[in-house]
Image: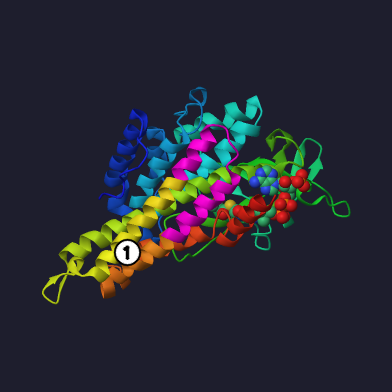
Amino acid sequence: MPTDTLLTPLSETQREIQRLAREFAANEIAPHADQWDRDAYFEPALVGKLGQLGFLGMLLPEEHDGLALDTVSYLLALEEVAVADASAAVLMSVHNSLPTQMILRWGNDEQKARFLGPMARGELLGAFALSEPESGSDASSLSTQAVKHGNDWVLTGTKAWVTSGTHAGAIVAMARTDQPGARKGAKGISAFIVTPDLPGFSVAKKEDKLGLRASPTVQLRFDEMRVPAANLLGEPGQGFIYAMQSLDHGRLGIAAQAIGIARAAFEAAMAYAKERTQFGQPILDFQAIQFKLSDMAVRIASARALLHATAAAKDRGENVGMFGSMSKLLASETAMWVTTQAVQVFGGYGYVKEYPVERFFRDAKVTEIYEGTSEIQRIVIARALSA
Ligand code: CAA
């Protein structure tokens, strides 16, 4: 049974998007993925290509050059890209789910006109800057300070774990606009659209990571960076709420990425089990291997079913915070488990770079960490259940 067989029927558009993404990923991404990983190389041309395809404005309305697609279509495309390369998928997920959606939802007309078209066309890559070196899971404890000076806000601080940060042209960054001595907790945080040309902006550090090595993750340094007041996004003091609401949806993208990684590992393990012979027969003929492959497929299908049901509920306008966390938790733990099993099916060959499963294994781990760790997802779920 092919693992991309879905229980719920797809519309014509959804099938077309899935096919387009699969072909693009197979032709333009998959042949390079191992080398990009080995070199920790980010291919800038990929942004333009994804933009041409419309894959950087999948959820934006047509008036901003977006494809105005439903969420399931977007997640189908993300899964296909993630099968080829999880690094390319996180670029797409963060860009489509976080900065573009935040500007669409809370930006004024001038901000939408300035940023959304170029972002949809792949001329401006988006990023999201919430975490800091001392503030991760406890996101509202962030300390980057913004102080109003005339028509500008002056921002000082360091943002951490910023996906695509080396190449981003529009970064939605959260900073404190309450002042020391009059702290307002989560309500003292505002959102700003930061561009790398602002005086005082610099990329401070590129992380040397276990996986997702072709996706640049950086620290950004704001050194008395002057941000025009016109770049304040939405209402002052609402930045944390905006970030949380956006992560509710961003987590669906990470779930699709995790499912794509798991599927890649499953497909590799199935192909290997058919061709690898031990004790005089293909190892697929051993029940030990059949059981592993069955369990892998069950978990992938379950994670995808929950994710797509959640996406459909989101498109019906329902609040999917809890189900988004459930989807991300299930998909990321599935990715980690499935990739671990895939390495086991490959045996020694799973542990070396000659085969791609060790990359899938390394790439899977971060899905249990970013956009909220598995522990944070369980907190969100428990709070929703007990409310
Ligand atoms: N939607 C709307 N409002 C929300 C919300 C949501 N999902 N979550 C919280 N809020 C509101 C609360 O209602 C509350 O407002 P009121 O006081 O008016 O009720 C306010 O925000 C503060 O909320 P909490 O008291 O619940 O805040 P908290 O400090 O206890 O933290 C948390 C809650 C769930 C632990 C949150 O901090 C969290 O999600 N942490 C994880 C952060 C995260 O996911 N970071 C990932 C960064 S992005 C990344 O990974 C990099 C990348 O580029 C991929």
Q: Determine the residue positioned at 28% across, 46% down.
A: 26
- Sort mark 1 into few (<14), some (14-19) or many (20+) by Cα contacts within 10 Å: many
Query: In the image, which residues are magenta?
Result: 307-334
Q: What predominant SS class does the magenta segment belong to?
A: helix
311 in magenta: yes
In this view, 72 is above or below 345: above
Residue 115 falls in image quadrant: top right
In this view, 98 is above or below 66: below
Residue position for label 1 = 357
- Tell whether circle 1 marks a residue whose Cβ is less than 8 angstroms from ligand 1: no
Q: Name the outermost residue toward the bottom.
A: 279
303 left or right, relative to 350: right
SS state under label 1: helix
155 left or right, relative to 83: right
Identify which amino acid the numbered label 1 is placed on.
Val
Quick check: can you spot residue 359?
Answer: yes
| Image position, residue 259 (x, y; %) | 40, 52
